[in-house]
């Protein structure tokens, strides 16, 4: 994101910097995460998912302290979304998450991205900034994936936790999607 202070601190930073390499590694982990889940190596998928989460914190720290750039600012949310969407679809396909939840999560992202693309093509570019409800939604989505992987891979489950997390994700996904549509429709 161009308004990101890490990007502004060093706009001439090379494409090939440590933060971008870490981000690219997270993006490359997406097909491996998919394969681990469909191969029913859920415990391994949990550890890969945890490593991907840690890499997100690491690349953000590197970008803030050593300078980020527009490539990293664009690649980071793509890597995050690719991993989350892949995990929701894949976990739903093996029955660890409800299929309708995966559809809802993906649909929200498609509405937001589709709306931005459509408006940009129509000559009305839209700058999307993360909202608090969207950040909460992302955290809840991550926690639900982690809980599902822990349960599926190691049998570690707190009774009722995934049900509560599922409904928290449903609520935050709908609220977040509606907030983006509302803000965009108002031209904010």
Image (cartoon, rainbow, N blue to C red):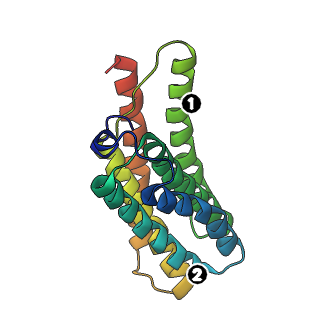
Front residue (pair 75, 20): 20
| For residue 170, above or below residue 61 | above
Which residue lies under the disc numbered 2?
44
What number is the disc on residue 114? 1
Task: Using residue 102 as the reference point, say whether residue 8 is left or right of it.
Answer: left
Which mark is on residue 70? none
Q: Can you say which quadrant of the picture contains the C terminus?
A: top left
Residue in the picture at 39% in, 72% down: 161
Q: Residue at x 36, y 63 (%)?
A: 57
Element marked by disc 2: helix
Q: Is residue 13 left or right of residue 3?
A: right
Q: Looking at this view, is 4 or 179 the one in front? A: 4
Picture residue at 38% right of the left edge, 49% below the top? 171
- Residue 139 position, x and y percent, is 36, 58
Kindly identify the residue that appears in the image at 34 percent across and 18 percent down.
Answer: 186
Q: In this view of the protein, can residue 65 be seen by the observer?
A: yes
Q: Give the mark, 2 or 1, whose residue is nearer the N terminus.
A: 2
Q: Is residue 26 above or below residue 44?
A: above
């Amino acid at each position: 994101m161009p308004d990101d202070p890490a990007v502004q601190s060093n706009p001439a930073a090379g494409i090939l910097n440590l933060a971008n390499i870490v981000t690219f590694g997270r993006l490359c982990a997406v097909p491996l995460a998919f394969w681990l889940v469909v191969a029913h190596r859920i415990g391994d998928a949990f550890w890969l998912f945890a490593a991907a989460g840690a890499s997100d914190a690491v690349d953000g720290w590197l970008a803030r302290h050593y300078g980020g750039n527009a490539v990293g600012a664009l690649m980071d949310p793509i890597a995050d979304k690719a991993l989350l969407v892949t995990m929701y679809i894949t976990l739903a396909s093996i029955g660890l998450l409800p299929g309708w939840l995966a559809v809802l999560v993906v649909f929200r992202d498609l509405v937001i991205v589709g709306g931005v693309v459509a408006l940009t093509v129509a000559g009305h570019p839209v700058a999307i900034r993360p909202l608090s409800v969207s950040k909460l939604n992302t955290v809840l989505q991550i926690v639900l994936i982690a809980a599902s992987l822990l349960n599926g891979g190691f049998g570690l489950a707190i009774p009722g936790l995934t049900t509560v997390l599922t409904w928290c994700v449903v609520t935050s996904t709908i609220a977040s999607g509606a907030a983006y549509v509302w803000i965009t429709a108002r031209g904010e």
